[in-house]
């Protein structure tokens, strides 16, 4: 009897130990966040590590379900308590999560009707970002009983590969279709708990400088144009990188411009530069991108998904032209008053630009690491001229579309 008891205890110990070992390896679905607007919602699944997952859509008469199966994943206590997220008077009915199997967590998005959906991943901390559009890509609100029309190919379905960009002589889709600009989103970088770059000499905080420039830019756009102008933040608050482009997408913006101030280890460097979204081998651009992406704690996992997200977008050509217009006209205006260096139009993989459904650029208004440049950025008059220069660049870009 004693031998049997010992054997039983040994087996029980092995089973408990094995179960603990397996659970220790499990990835945690930490949180489900969402940013919901009238015709657009972004859902973010926060995970403790990169995860393999599959997605599937099930259509029924009264509902459509879109679910993600996250392999080797368990729910956190926060997600368990969260239960079902219910949306009232929305095209989304609810979002719910459950432990589908011991090692598979399932997240279900349920809709009252079929919707345009896209998803991509952001890296370490690993996130799955799901964009749901309450309208079709042509901008018309979906009806409850949609007409049976031939489905048009989306930009994502048109496999053109990486666009060859050789300057403004290339006619992009926007120019071939004679499209124009009606809405702009201005994104003052950083904010709240994220101060951005801090001046080496006077401890100037980037978040305050860029917010002031953004407000002045909005003032000029509202005063001299009929454009609809929005800002991702109007005060000193923290906004996650993925929420910034989500906001721009929700507004169906035609242009997105993110405003920043730079810093460099070489304190002699100063000047103005404009970036557009792409990969680069330029060491300095890589350093700047790494600095601006810091709050996202990036990694190289699933690089393929990032490549696809960047290279398949038809916005590359327009983003480059937009960047050129901003750079040229801003400096042309500023140089009436200051000897301000041209730090060039560059490309870099900024997270804040990934996921934008429109031409998007990031401007570095100056270097807080340089004493002269920091003093200039602290000047209200200089910030006003920077804002007006950017305004002139935006107008030049809009005129070029005609």
Image: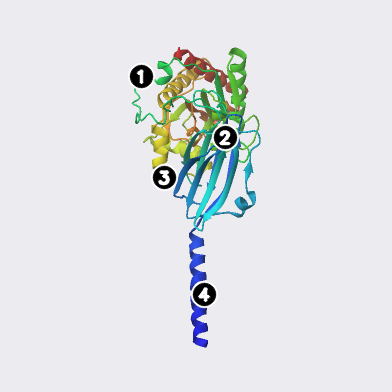
N-terminal of the pair, mark 3 or mark 1, is: 1
Local secondary structure at mark 2? strand
Reading the image, the residue beneath label 3 is 302
The structure residue drawn at horizontal position 33% and vertical position 26%, both measured from the top left corner, is 164
197 or 392: nearer the viewer? 392
Judge left or right: residue 42 versus residue 319: right
Q: Is residue 36 above or below residue 253?
A: below
Frontmost of labels 3 and 2 is 2
- Res. 393 in view: yes
Q: CA distance from mark 3 to mark 4?
A: 39 Å
Q: CA distance from mark 4 to mark 2?
A: 48 Å
Q: CA distance from mark 3 to mark 1?
A: 31 Å
Local secondary structure at mark 1? loop
Q: Which mark is residue 41?
A: 2
186 or 196: nearer the viewer? 186
Reading the image, the residue beneath label 1 is 170
């Amino acid at each position: 009897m004693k031998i049997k008891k010992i054997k039983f205890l040994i087996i029980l110990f092995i089973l408990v130990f094995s179960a603990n070992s397996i659970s220790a390896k499990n990835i945690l679905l930490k949180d489900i966040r969402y940013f919901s607007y009238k015709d657009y919602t972004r859902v973010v699944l926060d995970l403790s590590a990169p995860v393999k997952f599959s997605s599937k859509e099930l259509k029924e008469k009264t509902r459509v379900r879109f679910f993600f199966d996250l392999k080797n994943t368990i729910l956190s206590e926060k997600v368990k308590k969260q239960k079902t997220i219910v949306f009232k008077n929305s095209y989304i009915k609810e979002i719910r999560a459950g432990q589908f199997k011991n090692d598979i967590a399932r997240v279900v998005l349920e809709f009252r009707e079929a919707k345009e959906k896209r998803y991509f991943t952001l890296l370490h901390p690993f996130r799955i970002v799901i964009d749901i559009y309450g309208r079709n890509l042509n901008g018309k609100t979906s009806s409850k009983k949609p007409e049976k029309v031939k489905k048009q190919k989306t930009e994502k379905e048109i496999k053109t590969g990486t666009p060859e960009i050789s300057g403004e002589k290339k006619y992009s889709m926007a120019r071939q279709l004679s499209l124009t600009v009606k809405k702009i989103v201005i994104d003052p970088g950083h904010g709240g708990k994220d101060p951005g770059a801090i001046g080496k000499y006077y401890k100037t905080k980037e978040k305050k400088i860029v917010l002031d420039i953004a407000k002045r830019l909005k003032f000029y756009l509202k005063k001299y144009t009929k454009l609809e102008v929005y800002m991702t933040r109007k005060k000193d608050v923290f906004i996650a990188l993925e929420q910034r482009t989500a906001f721009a997408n929700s507004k169906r913006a035609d242009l997105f411009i993110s405003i920043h101030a730079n810093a460099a280890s070489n304190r002699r460097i100063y000047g103005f530069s404009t970036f557009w979204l792409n990969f680069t081998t330029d060491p300095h651009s890589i350093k700047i991108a790494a600095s601006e992406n810091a709050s996202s704690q990036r990694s190289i996992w699933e690089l393929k998904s990032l490549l696809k997200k960047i290279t398949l977008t038809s916005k590359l050509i327009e983003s480059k032209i937009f960047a050129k217009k901003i750079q040229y006209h801003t400096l042309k205006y500023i140089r009436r008053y200051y000897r301000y260096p041209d730090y060039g139009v560059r490309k870099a993989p900024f997270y804040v630009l990934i996921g934008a459904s429109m031409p998007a650029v990031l401007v570095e208004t100056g270097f807080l690491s340089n004493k002269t440049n920091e003093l200039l950025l602290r000047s209200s008059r200089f910030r006003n001229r920077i804002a007006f220069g950017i305004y002139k660049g935006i107008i030049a870009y809009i005129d070029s579309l005609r």
